[in-house]
Image: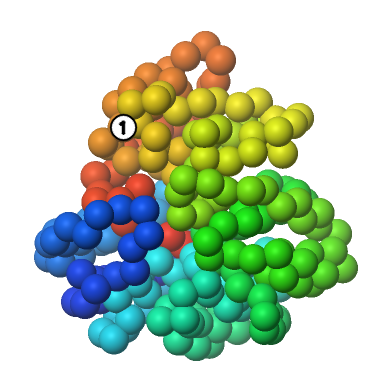
Amino acid sequence: MLTAITREVSASINDCELSFHAREPIDVAKAIAQHKAYRDCLAELGVRVVSLPAEPELPDAVFVEDPAVVVDEVAVISIMGVPSRRPEARSLADALSRYRPITFLVDPATLDGGDVLRIGRFVFAGLSRRTNRQGITQLDNILRSYGYQVQPVEVRGCLHLKSACSYIGHDTILLNRSWIDAERFRGFQLLDVPDEEPAAANALLIKDVVIIPASFPKTRGCFRSEDFACGRLIYLSCRRQKPASLARV
């Protein structure tokens, strides 16, 4: 069974780190309700959901994907690019240790899990404001022994690689090519998000279902084209691209 590790929304989420968005007030109660809808959606798709308690002093901790990279054989605990977020890794490492052997990146590496896109044995790692070359090199050294190929991808204009692209099945990547080097994805079918919805490329594939925000109707039309045939689409309403990320174990 696919297991998703999630974390409750912190009451301090209004103090979250921001790099590419203007700070706007976040309705905490609404964010909590949206996060519950996200977990419910995963459960309805047959995913076993593990919900960790909120971290009151860590406003970004709901985004559990960033402190770790999880593959079938191992969980790699990262050193996140923003120092204030690094304590998030402690409890997440404890949770992941029940499912995977744990290994750690070391200084001077920095890497956010949101910069890592895995497609089978290919792992694309975003070189971004949060992830440096040392982080990608160390990830490559760890995963290569398990048969993975790590390829760096330059990220520009957005926070993480997976802000700009997502694997949506059928050898297809949904992407905003103005934010990344699309040449790195040669061999895949590329589905461009509409210019009016630049942030729509952050989607989530669960089995044969693609989860995307309800706020991107033009992108919804792209999925209905004859160029792409997926199993189902689910549209979630949320403040950001996704209410939270998940570590799959």
- Vertical position of residue 88 compared to residue 183: above or below: below
Q: How is the image coloured?
A: rainbow
In the rendered view, would you say 166 is above or below 108? above
The image quadrant of residue 147 is: bottom right
Q: Position of residue 130 (x, y in %)?
A: 53, 65
Quadrant of the drawing holding the N terminus: bottom right
- 62 left or right of 165 in image: left
In the picture shown, does residue 195 fall above or below 7? above
Query: Which SS class for mark 1?
Result: loop
Nearest the eye: 11 or 43: 11
At horizontal 50% and vertical 67% (from top left) the residue drawn is 66
Q: Is residue 164 left or right of residue 35?
A: right
- Residue 153 in the image: x percent, y percent? 67, 48
Quadrant of the image containing the C terminus: bottom right
Residue closest to the eye, 135 or 22: 22
* Residue underneath mark 1: 216
- Residue at left 27%, top 60%? 35
